[in-house]
Image (tube, rainbow, N blue to C red):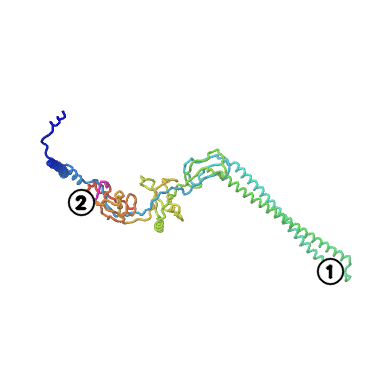
């Protein structure tokens, strides 16, 4: 049984050297077949690329015209503007407060109503102050009567003084005459022409008159003292009358304060105190707030870098300002620049400005935010393109320029400023050029285009 496998052993196996040569030939044959297969694959790909349906699709796509909208570049007047965000503020905002204490008995307006200067607003119970006014009037009448009495007393005492002074003059003259006569009689007595009894009678009369003159002089002094007292009393009465008149005027003013009128033309706010409530003098809570809305301010700020430009153009005259209420506002409110602050805000690097608007249509309201357009000047020959024509790339801002053969060229442009949906071009374009305004996303330099809707225009009314 051990010898059976030998029965199946091959007896035609080639020699060892011949077996090695046949293996190498097989390997070469396999490599040749693989190379042919690879070359056939490349050839098929080349055939499909150059003669198959894909090449036709690519060729058709390269000749398709991109639909675009275009507009011409024009030379036209353009304003030089500064734009900012502004806040509408009232020129005057008045907090109405009571200047007397009392009960609020009447309100003459409705909340939010427009009032004119001098219109009645509130009435505070006037009766206590009416009584005070009558009391002041009575005091004045009483003290004026006292003045009149003092004046009468003064006149009477002045007459008494005049009489006393006349008595002095009269009695002094009589005394002088008596003394002269006594002197003559004294000489006659010495000569023995008259008796001593006659001399004594004349001398006694002279001495009596001297005493009378002294009495008259005392009466004059007393009359002058009484007159001085009367004058002082009159001055006191007059001072009292002046005080009474001041009190009367104050009572009249206090009574007038019970009726509160509007100090300005404006719109009332919410009513803070209603009828029947007690009000105090200068209470912390106002009765109502009135805002003047016509004319009205718009306050805004511009960067300090624009200050030199503003100063330069502001010398030439009044600068126009527009207040745009929103993106859909086609009729902005127009005003003039009336105020520029005297210092730059160091925290923000801006300077505050105010423009005044007549606001006849009352479109502007205090606290409202608006877009402000400050027009400094008008450039007469600016080059304009629509803003939507300008694109941005890594190289800068550019437009697609339409060439006569209906292909496009990418052209870098230099922008000076923007205004009202247009760009003012400083360089890169000339009037008469045509630029693409819509469809740029599908364009590359040299692409063929098809203009849809005809040629747009940037023509517009000059500012």
Question: Residue 24: in sight, yes or no?
Answer: yes
Residue 248: give its label.
Answer: none
As for residue 261 lying within the magenta part, the answer is no
Q: Residue furthest left?
A: 12
Q: Position of residue 446 (x, y in %)?
A: 22, 50
The correct choice, above or below, for 29 with respect to 411 in the image is above
Which residue appears at 35% of the width and 55% of the height? 378
Q: Residues within 10 Å of mark 2 (few under 14, many from 20)?
A: few
Q: Residues within 10 Å of mark 1 (few under 14, many from 20)?
A: few
Taking depth in this image into account, of 225 and 401 the one nearest to the observer is 401
User: Residue, x 68% and y 50% (percent of image)?
Assistant: 146
User: Which tag is nearer the camera, tag 2 or tag 1?
Assistant: 2
Mark 1 residue element: helix
- Where is the N terminus found, in terms of image quarters? top left
Q: Residues in magenta?
A: 440-445
Nearer to me, 241 or 441: 441
Residue 353 in sight in this render: no
Q: How many numbered marks, from 0 up? A: 2
Mark 2 vs 1, N-terminal side: 1
User: Where's residue 282, x and y in %?
Assistant: 56, 45
Using residue 447 as the reference point, say whether residue 257 is left or right of it.
right
Quick one: 76 or 121, which is closer to the camera? 76
Residue that numbered label 1 is attached to: 184
Going by the picture, which residue comes out furthest to the bottom?
Answer: 191
Q: Of all residues shown, which one is farthest toward the top? A: 1
Query: Which mark is drawn over residue 405?
Result: 2
> Residue 217, how many percent across, how many down?
77, 60
Q: Position of residue 140 (x, y in %)?
A: 64, 48
């Amino acid at each position: 049984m051990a010898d059976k496998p030998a029965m199946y052993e091959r007896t035609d196996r080639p020699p060892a050297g011949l077996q090695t040569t046949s293996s190498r030939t097989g390997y070469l044959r396999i490599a040749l077949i693989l190379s042919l297969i690879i070359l056939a694959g490349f050839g098929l790909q080349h055939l499909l690329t150059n003669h198959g349906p894909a090449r036709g699709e690519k060729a058709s796509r390269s000749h398709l015209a991109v639909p675009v909208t275009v507009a011409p570049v024009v030379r036209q007047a353009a304003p030089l503007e500064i734009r900012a965000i502004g806040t509408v503020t009232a020129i005057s905002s008045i907090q109405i407060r009571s200047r007397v204490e009392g009960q609020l008995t009447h309100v003459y307006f409705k909340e939010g109503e427009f009032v004119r200067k001098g219109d009645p607003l509130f009435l505070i119970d006037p009766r206590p102050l009416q009584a005070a006014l009558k009391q002041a009037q009575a005091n004045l009448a009483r003290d004026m009567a006292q003045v009149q009495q003092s004046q009468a007393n003064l006149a009477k005492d002045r007459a008494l003084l005049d009489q006393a002074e006349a008595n002095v003059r009269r009695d002094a003259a009589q005394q002088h005459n008596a003394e002269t006569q006594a002197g003559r009689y004294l000489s006659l007595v010495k000569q023995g022409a008259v008796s001593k009894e006659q001399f004594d009678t004349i001398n006694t009369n002279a001495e009596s008159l001297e005493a009378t003159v002294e009495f008259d002089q005392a009466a004059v002094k007393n009359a002058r003292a009484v007159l001085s007292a009367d004058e002082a009393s009159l001055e006191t009465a007059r001072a009292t009358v002046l005080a009474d008149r001041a009190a009367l005027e104050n009572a009249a003013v206090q009574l007038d304060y019970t009726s509160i009128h509007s100090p300005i033309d404006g719109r009332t706010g919410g009513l803070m105190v209603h009828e029947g409530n007690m009000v105090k003098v200068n209470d912390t809570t106002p009765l109502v707030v009135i805002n003047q809305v016509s004319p009205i301010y718009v306050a805004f700020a511009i960067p300090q870098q624009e200050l030199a430009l503003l100063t330069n153009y502001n010398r030439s005259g009044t600068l126009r300002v527009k207040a745009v209420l929103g993106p859909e506002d086609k009729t902005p409110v127009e005003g003039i620049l009336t105020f520029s602050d005297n210092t730059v805000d160091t925290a923000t690097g801006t300077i505050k400005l105010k423009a005044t608007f007549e606001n006849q249509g009352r479109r502007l309201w205090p606290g409202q935010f608006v877009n402000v357009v400050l027009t400094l000047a008008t450039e007469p020959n600016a080059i304009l393109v629509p803003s939507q024509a300008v694109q941005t790339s890594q190289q800068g801002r550019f437009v697609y320029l339409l060439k006569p053969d209906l292909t496009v060229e990418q052209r870098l442009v230099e922008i000076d400023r923007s205004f009202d949906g247009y760009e003012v071009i400083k360089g890169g374009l000339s009037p008469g050029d045509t630029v693409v305004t819509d469809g740029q996303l599908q364009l590359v330099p040299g692409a063929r285009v098809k203009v849809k809707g005809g040629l747009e225009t940037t023509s517009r009314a000059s500012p």
